[in-house]
Amino acid sequence: MKKLHELRVPSCVRFLLSVLPLLALAHLAPAEQDGAKVLFDFEKDALGEGWTAGGDLRASREPAVGEGASGQALRLAAGGSGGVYTKPAGVPADWNEFSHVTFRACPVLAAGDAPVVMEVQVLEGDGRTRFWRKIELARGGWQSVEVRLAAMRWSAGRVPQWDAVSRLGFYLRSKGEVWIDDVAVRPAGPRAAQWSPKELALLAFGADKAGKTRPVANNDLLLLSDAPELDADKLAAHLARVAQAVYADFPQAGARRAPVGLLVFADRKEYQDFTLRLANELASQATAPKSDGYTLQGIATSYYHPQAGTLRPTYTHEYVHALLGRTLRLQNSGEWLQEGLAVRYQLRFHPQANVGEIIRQGLGDANFRLPLATLCNGRSVPMNRYWQAMTVADMLLGHERYSKRVPALLEAISKAGSTDLGPHLQPVLETSWEHLEADWRLWCEKKYQERNR
């Protein structure tokens, strides 16, 4: 997944978003508390009892000022960047049934001032793993802000989960002042924090096609497509077998099973455009993917190709990326573990005749492989080294010395928020790079001998 760049939404676009019923994500709108669950109104408790501040920021509970103000409010004044956060367990522990977080904000702005740029963050207990949304407040006075939880971005590291959050924060990116009041969440039923099938279809295919799109869903998949040639039921049955293979290798993944989205577009241009639209909904920017498949924030995407048909290997590959993110909380950043596992399951269900030849060539020439310390450093792996990432992942799962340590390795990786294997070699795998490299080479030589062509 490529890095998302920030997008400043012009005021005219913010206005249009506020009046359109379609996916109003973080717009400024009239205050609405009907059915909402108020978390903080700052009327009673002292601020220090439930909140903590960090960075160059002063937080205080004071009588609210400005037209339409009443009672007490949270005042944030930043000399640089800084934030204020609830202490652990300061908010409900499971946000899956909430659709929005809402609050009232009053930026202190004089004529000609730049907008106050802030983030609303929903964090797990470690304070690093979080959902977040950039918000620009360009006009003064009290105004209501609502943020669609599904449209919040993921922090780097392990994938955040709505049933694991325990903290709420407001972060100012630069010098500025803003007042916050009436922080609430909006209950909306099971899985409300995720894109609904209707929302996702509307975002993917537009109003004209969305109503004609038949979702195919089960416990592990939400498949949407506007490609008439695609046999959606056949693909869903195939991916159910893929999911079971993943759960067989990773029993802990099955405990977190939930439908992951796969979008198959009728043509390549629509597929590429969707990535740009989804990034925009996240208040970000992205470049159109050049690959045949792309997974962004847990949504796998590709397009229909007549020669590849319904069971296109790309669909399996991207689906595995999304499934691993959902169940094992592995961020899809093109690193060795995500790519290695995705290729492993792709080849299991879509065998490729020349795999053995590619691996033997890599073993025989150092120019065609990377040192494992480089390959497994947690950074993006070049596509021409996916074979190597696959064989390392395959060895860890199949080698008697390492397979029993895989659950502990995944736990350590999740805690660290990185798939950099170096810190876990000795404590978890009880090996060194030298021994791991030797075991890996021997594994590949045995499995991909000349007779296995």
Image (cartoon, rainbow, N blue to C red):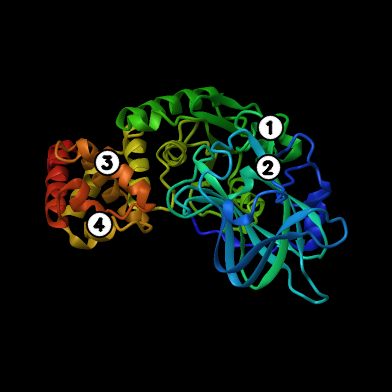
Residue at mark 3 to residue at mark 4: CA–CA distance: 15 Å
Mark number displayed over residue 408: 3
Mark 4 touches mark 2? (CB < 8 Å): no
Residue in the picture at 34% in, 56% down: 378
Q: Amino acid at mark 2?
A: His
Residue 115 seen in the figure:
yes
Mark 3 touches mark 4? (CB < 8 Å): no
Residue at mark 1 to residue at mark 3: CA–CA distance: 36 Å
| Secondary structure beneath label 3 | helix
* Residue beneath disc 1: 188
* Residue beneath disc 2: 100
Q: Amino acid at mark 4?
A: Gly
Q: Quadrant of residue 264?
A: top right
Residue 354 seen in the figure:
no
Circle 2 Cα neighbour tier, 10 Å, few/some/many (<14 / 14–19 / ≥20)? many
Q: Earlier in the sequence, mark 3 or mark 4?
A: 3
Which tag is nearer the camera, tag 1 or tag 4?
Answer: 1
Residue at mark 1 to residue at mark 4: CA–CA distance: 43 Å
The relative height of residue 168 versus residue 65 in the rendered view (above or below) is above
Residue in the picture at 66% in, 36% down: 201
Residue at mark 2 to residue at mark 3: CA–CA distance: 35 Å
Q: Quadrant of residue 187?
A: top right
* Residue beneath disc 4: 422
| Secondary structure beneath label 1 | loop
Q: Residue 27: x, y in percent?
A: 75, 52
| Secondary structure beneath label 4 | helix
Q: Amino acid at mark 1?
A: Ala
